[in-house]
Amino acid sequence: MNCVIFSSYFPSISYISKFIICDSVTIDIYEKYIKQTYRNRCNIMAANGINSLIVPVKKSHNGITKDTVIDYSENWQKSHYRTLLSAYKNSAFYDYYIPELMPLFNEKEKFLINLNSKILEIIFKILNISPIYCYSNKYIENEDIKDYRNLIHPKSHKNIEDKEFSQAEYVQVFSDRHGFVKDLSILDLIFNMGPLSLGILQKSISRTNTNLH
């Protein structure tokens, strides 16, 4: 099965699962940029509950995702790093993985898709997977390809039921306060579960009509 998905900032667990389900993934960077989605944000679990980390962006001249420029007028990188430190410093694998992520909070990519691309490469390295994926050279309009561009949304009322993903529970830092919270950023999974993260991902995938790599 081939599929298409959007570019995402520290993607959700269900987003990463698509790279396991699909034979190949095309990341559509020629789509119209949609505000208030996972394209420039992610959800993590902090002491007070779910916290959204948002990358501020400037309006592109053509409204296309590939031309969306990051806004550095405020030091959001420092803020995101401090929030992650506060949320996950007591997790089992934060100290182990944060050095690999630090360049993301120090270097300044111009375009959002370049930042998201670097994130994806690091996540795949941590998970020890090598999915087949590419970036589009035009807007994808193909009825024969599985389309996930509108499936995964941070606002629950806009989410479409994902019949290929059912979150397997795992240990979370603040579960004693908030219970288990499903489908957070992949960071929540890897900071808490480390080398067991891929197994949790695979357990979360419905085996119906899928072929795990």
Image (tube, rainbow, N blue to C red):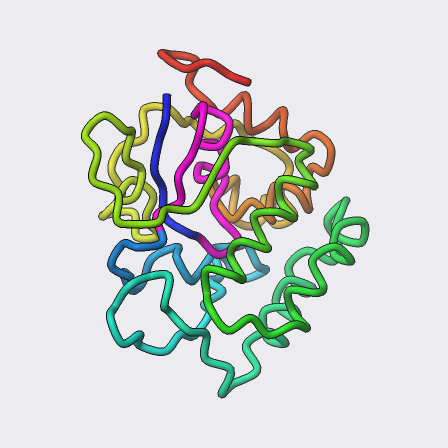
Q: Nearer the viewer, residue 168 or 39?
A: 39
Residue at the front extreme, as displayed: 137
Q: Please tell me whether residue 186 belongs to the stretch shown in magenta.
A: no
Residue at horizontal 63%, vertical 76%? 78
> Residue 19 at x, y = what percent?
49, 32
Residue at the right extreme, as displayed: 96
Q: Quadrant of the C terminus?
A: top right
Residue at horizontal 64%, vertical 59%? 87
> Residue 161 at x, y = what percent?
27, 32
Q: Please tell me whether residue 14 belongs to the stretch shown in magenta.
A: yes
> Residue 179 at x, y = what percent?
52, 42
Residue at horizontal 68%, vertical 46%? 191
Q: Nearer the viewer, residue 177 or 126?
A: 126
> Residue 185 at x, y = what percent?
52, 48
Q: Is 153 situated left or right of 187 in this image?
A: left
Is 57 above or below relative to 190? below
Chain part drawn in magenta: 8-28
Q: Quadrant of the N terminus?
A: top left
Residue at horizontal 51%, vertical 27%? 20
Q: Is 107 situated left or right of 6 in this image?
A: right
Is 178 above or below relative to 142? below
Disc tally is: 0
